């Protein structure tokens, strides 16, 4: 029976397995076909998506190649562009034709093939354009711009390529999703078939088989129960015996293993201890420092070679001896107290610290040592280890350094005193030369005499500038030049600075212009004086070395990658551009060295000390920036200035400065001033493109409506086409073909041009120009470059005069250099006490003050000044600082002491040749109220006196 059941069961089992095998093979084949297709889809979708990224990267690298952030990176950018192109082409061709390396099958659907046909022209255009760029040499690449045809081809084709590539990726993704859905259907079908097969097998095959097995199992169970009963009795005894035997064997094995591990561990520990001891001994014996170990009794138990070299004792001489033999007598009592404290369980306060003490050598010599002390334990026993270094040489070096520092500080003080004295001694006679020359020029002179005196004045001013440069350079070298941080109007500062140089430029018929990016804040915080000094040096050099063309000062913001929206500082990039003789490349760094120019012939032809550029670079570096030069002019700058003149090589001096942005309240002009100008139509006529941009920028800032033209012909055409359109004309004076005066003559002859307000700008005025301005009823005649405030003022005045019809034909036009006649004696009636010991300076100061309308009392020293102050009622005191008998500081202190009893205060202005750092503060701290440096300038002196004298000529304060 069992044999028949086994045969039947085997047959049924084979049938069930066969059905499962057939179903599984079919399912596997279907799924394998779909999965194979899906596996080939993954690299296709991945690489087609990557192709978009490579296309964008290709475009970006083309732009980097033609506009690199750093010129020296262009070779790297070119190599990177070539690698990207190769990857991009390979992937594109692989997607179309297949690529075994990239696992691309190339078996595309009709829809994908059609899309590749659409994208092919743009692929070829981008590929050929980039390959043409890569074939160019580096010089050709440097001249390329973003407007180059090859770059434009890439920029035009790239977006279309990306758009079609998106469609290809979408089609690939769509086809992959269709296959996923197909796979899901196959899986559902297979799972359903398997479930149905399992149910059928369970009902038809396994259920009858299980029933038969049950019956056979019951019969076998009854037979097995009888057999097990017999076996149980026999095995029980055998199991007990076997268990006892196994327990004994396990105990023996375990104990043997424990003994072996204990022995091995002990050997490893002993080996490690021996190695550690050998390393420590080797380190100790090879150290140059003394390493000494002692117990709590202060007995030495170890001594290395370094200790022998430092103290002179052999090891056998000191082992077991007290540590006190190594220290001077004055330390021994304190050392013993520390040991007693430790033996009682306390702490030794020097443990873990590094001390500088004195040691005692074997020969009794004391020497400086550096001691580091540590403790360690072995069981309950505490030991000390000290590391001792002989610092005799270090102490000698420190002493030498201290003495050298004292010598250097003394030399620095002597240099500062020398500079202060030199400044005083030079400025005192220079004050007399310049002052007396100015006074002489105000008298009636013959033309030849006036020419000679003007040459004297110019030479003296040049000498003073050289002296100031030398003093500035010395202060920078000594580290005694500090910068001032205060708000200032950037545009006004640059405009006023260039205005002081406009006369020099006009003498050489050079156009001096400036351009400031409109995005730059009006007010910034920094040292306006030092910025002005750098600009004067650079622009002065540009004028000196340029014979034809123009000088341009250009300012724009240099964006920082780390700057955020809340950043309160801005980097400004200044460019001083000239069309002059240029600078050879091998000389471009040397010109920033002290007393250096491009070559000797330059010095002979143009003159100069070679200090200006060196000082300018150092000032810029003090302000946190840098300075460099380019020559000849880069193509971008030539394009910007748009000059048609025959010019030299040209050069551009760059420097960067970081300024804080001033408070927002300072940034905008008063709205009341410009309210009436909104929408006002203005005609601007200037042949210089930079001037036109600057004027247009200013007028748009006041919400006016400017029309800008480049010639008088264009302007006349505009006026003829719309006679009543314009309310104001701003014109250049010097223009080709038709100059400014001829243009205004034609305007005045026009029907509506007779009363039209006109403002004329000129690079250099001539004496006869003012008469022509009066004849032509020109409202204002300004010297370029014009500042915004200056232009706004004359526009408002011109419009007011026009509206009120108060402009007679013979009225003198306003100019930027004309002073009011009411200010001939602006300080009439002011009584001043002058304390000055130098006779020349006395005469100069007295004459200047008398021309201002003041009455003057003269004191020859401090004593006379105090006595005259007590006996005379004066409005103000001009106090020289250096005088015999009693100097200006002592005289001021005495006057202030006497004033305490009366509660009165007389203003005192320091009149000194001291112009070094701290001199002003020293005068103010001494009790003086103001400060004027020599050489004395009339305007500066007048302004300082006005600070303390009211309009009715009474001093600000109470007088005795």
Image (cartoon, grey):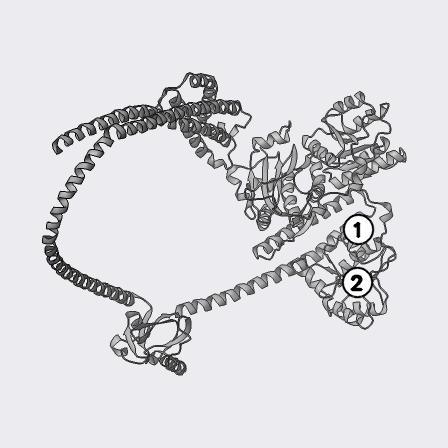
Residue 70: give its label: none
The spot of residue 795 in percent (x, y) is: 80, 36
Residue 159 in view here? yes
The spot of residue 936 in percent (x, y) is: 75, 54
Front-lying residue, 180 or 93: 180
Neighbours of disc 1 within 10 Å: few (<14), some (14-19), many (20+): few
Q: Residue at x 19, y 36 (%)?
A: 215
Left-right relation of 584 to 870: left
Query: Taking 442 as reference, is 426 above or below it?
Result: below
Residue 101 in view here? no
Front-lying residue, 69 or 515: 69
Neighbours of disc 2 within 10 Å: few (<14), some (14-19), many (20+): many
Of mark 1 and mark 2, the one earlier in the sequence is: 1
The spot of residue 774 in percent (x, y) is: 85, 34
Q: Residue at x 17, y 60 (%)?
A: 254
Query: Taking 583 as reference, is 475 above or below it?
Result: below
Q: CA distance from mark 1 to mark 2?
A: 27 Å
Question: Which quadrant would the N terminus be assigned to in this image?
Answer: top left
The spot of residue 815 in percent (x, y) is: 80, 39
Residue 907: give its label: 2
Q: Which residue is mark 1?
A: 439
Question: Which quadrant would the C terminus be assigned to in this image?
Answer: bottom right
Secondary-structure class at tag 2: loop
Mark 1 vs mark 2: give the one in front: 2
Left-right relation of 933 to 254: right
């Amino acid at each position: 029976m069992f044999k028949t059941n086994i045969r039947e069961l085997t047959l049924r089992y084979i049938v069930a397995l066969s059905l499962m095998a057939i179903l599984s093979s079919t399912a596997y084949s279907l799924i394998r076909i779909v999965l194979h297709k899906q596996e080939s889809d993954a690299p296709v979708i991945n690489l087609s998506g990557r192709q978009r990224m490579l296309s964008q990267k290709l475009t970006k690298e083309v732009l980097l190649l033609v506009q690199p952030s750093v010129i020296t990176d262009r070779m790297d950018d070119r190599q990177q562009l070539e690698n990207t192109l190769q990857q991009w082409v390979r992937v594109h061709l692989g997607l179309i034709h297949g690529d075994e390396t990239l696992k691309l099958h190339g078996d595309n659907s009709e829809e994908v093939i059609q899309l590749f046909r659409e994208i092919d022209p743009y692929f070829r255009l981008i590929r050929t354009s980039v390959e043409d760029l890569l074939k160019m040499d580096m010089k050709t690449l440097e001249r390329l711009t973003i407007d180059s045809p090859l770059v434009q081809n890439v920029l035009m084709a790239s977006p279309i390529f990306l758009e079609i590539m998106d469609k290809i990726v979408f089609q690939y993704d769509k086809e992959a999703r269709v296959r996923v859905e197909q796979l899901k259907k196959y899986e559902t079908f297979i799972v359903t078939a398997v479930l149905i097969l399992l149910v059928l097998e369970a009902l038809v095959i396994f259920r009858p088989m299980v029933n038969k097995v049950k019956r056979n199992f019951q019969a076998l169970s009854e037979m097995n129960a009888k057999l097990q009963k017999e076996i149980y009795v026999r095995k029980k005894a055998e199991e007990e015996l076997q268990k006892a035997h196994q327990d004994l064997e396990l105990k023996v094995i375990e104990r043997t293993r424990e003994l072996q591990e204990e022995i091995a561990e002990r050997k490893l520990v002993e080996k490690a201890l021996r190695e550690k001891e050998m390393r420590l001994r080797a380190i100790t014996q090879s150290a140059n420092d003394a390493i000494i170990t002692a117990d709590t009794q202060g007995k030495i138990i170890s001594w290395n070679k370094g200790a022998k070299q430092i103290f002179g004792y052999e090891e056998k001489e000191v082992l077991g001896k007290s540590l006190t033999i190594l220290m001077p007598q004055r330390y021994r009592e304190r050392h013993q107290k520390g040991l007693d404290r430790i033996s009682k369980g306390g702490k030794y306060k020097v443990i873990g610290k590094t001390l500088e003490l004195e040691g005692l050598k074997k020969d009794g010599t004391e020497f400086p040592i550096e001691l580091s002390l540590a403790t360690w334990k072995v069981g309950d026993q505490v030991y000390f280890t000290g590391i001792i270094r002989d610092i005799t040489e270090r102490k000698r070096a420190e002493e030498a350094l201290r003495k050298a520092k004292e010598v250097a500080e003394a030399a620095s003080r002597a240099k500062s005193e020398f500079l202060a004295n030199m400044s005083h001694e030079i400025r005192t006679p220079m004050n007399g030369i310049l002052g007396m020359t100015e006074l002489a020029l105000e008298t009636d002179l013959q033309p030849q005499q006036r020419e000679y005196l003007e040459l004297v004045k110019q030479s003296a001013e040049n000498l003073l500038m050289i002296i100031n440069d030398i003093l500035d350079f010395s202060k920078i070298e000594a580290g005694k030049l500090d910068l001032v941080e205060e708000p200032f109007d950037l545009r006004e500062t640059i405009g006023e600075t260039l205005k002081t140089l406009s006369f020099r430029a006009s003498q050489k018929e050079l156009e001096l212009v400036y351009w400031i990016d409109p995005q730059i804040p009006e007010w910034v915080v920094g040292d306006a004086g030092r910025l002005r000094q750098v600009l004067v040096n650079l622009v002065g050099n540009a004028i000196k070395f340029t014979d034809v063309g123009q000088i341009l000062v250009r300012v724009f913001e240099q964006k920082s990658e780390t700057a955020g929206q809340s950043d309160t500082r801005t980097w400004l990039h200044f460019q001083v551009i000239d069309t002059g003789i240029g600078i050879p490349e091998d000389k471009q760094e040397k010109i920033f060295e002290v007393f250096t120019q491009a070559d000797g012939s330059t010095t002979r032809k143009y003159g100069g000390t070679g200090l200006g550029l060196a000082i300018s670079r150092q000032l810029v570096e003090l302000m946190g920036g840098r300075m460099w030069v380019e020559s000849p002019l880069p193509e971008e700058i030539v394009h910007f200035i748009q000059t048609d003149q025959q010019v030299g090589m040209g050069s551009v001096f760059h420097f960067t400065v970081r300024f804080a942005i001033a408070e927002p309240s300072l940034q905008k002009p008063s709205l009341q001033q410009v309210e009436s100008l909104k929408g006002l139509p203005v005609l601007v006529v200037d042949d210089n493109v930079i001037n036109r941009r600057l004027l247009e920028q200013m007028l748009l800032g006041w919400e006016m409506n400017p029309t800008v033209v480049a010639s008088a012909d264009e302007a006349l055409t505009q006026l003829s086409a719309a006679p009543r359109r314009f309310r104001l004309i701003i014109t250049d004076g010097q223009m080709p073909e038709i100059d400014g005066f001829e243009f205004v003559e034609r305007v005045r002859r026009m029907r509506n041009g007779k009363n039209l307000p006109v403002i004329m700008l000129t690079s250099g005025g001539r004496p006869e120009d003012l008469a022509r301005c009066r004849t032509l009823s020109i409202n204002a005649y300004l010297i370029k470059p014009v500042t915004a405030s200056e232009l706004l003022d004359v526009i408002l005045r011109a419009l007011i005069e026009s509206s009120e019809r108060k402009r007679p034909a013979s009225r003198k036009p306003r100019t930027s250099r004309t002073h009011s006649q009411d200010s001939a004696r602006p300080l009439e009636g002011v009584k001043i006490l002058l304390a000055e010991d130098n006779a020349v300076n006395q005469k100069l100061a007295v004459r200047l003050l008398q021309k201002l309308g003041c009455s003057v009392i003269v004191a020859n020293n401090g004593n006379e000044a105090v006595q005259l102050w007590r006996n005379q009622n004066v409005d103000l005191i001009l106090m020289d600082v250096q005088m015999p008998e009693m100097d200006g500081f002592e005289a001021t202190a005495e006057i202030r002491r006497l004033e305490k009893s009366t509660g009165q205060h007389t203003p005192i202005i320091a009149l000194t040749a001291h112009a070094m750092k701290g001199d002003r503060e020293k005068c103010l701290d001494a009790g003086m109220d103001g400060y004027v440096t020599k050489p004395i300038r009339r305007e500066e002196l007048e302004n300082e006196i006005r600070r303390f004298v009211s309009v009715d000529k009474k001093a600000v304060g109470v007088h005795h």
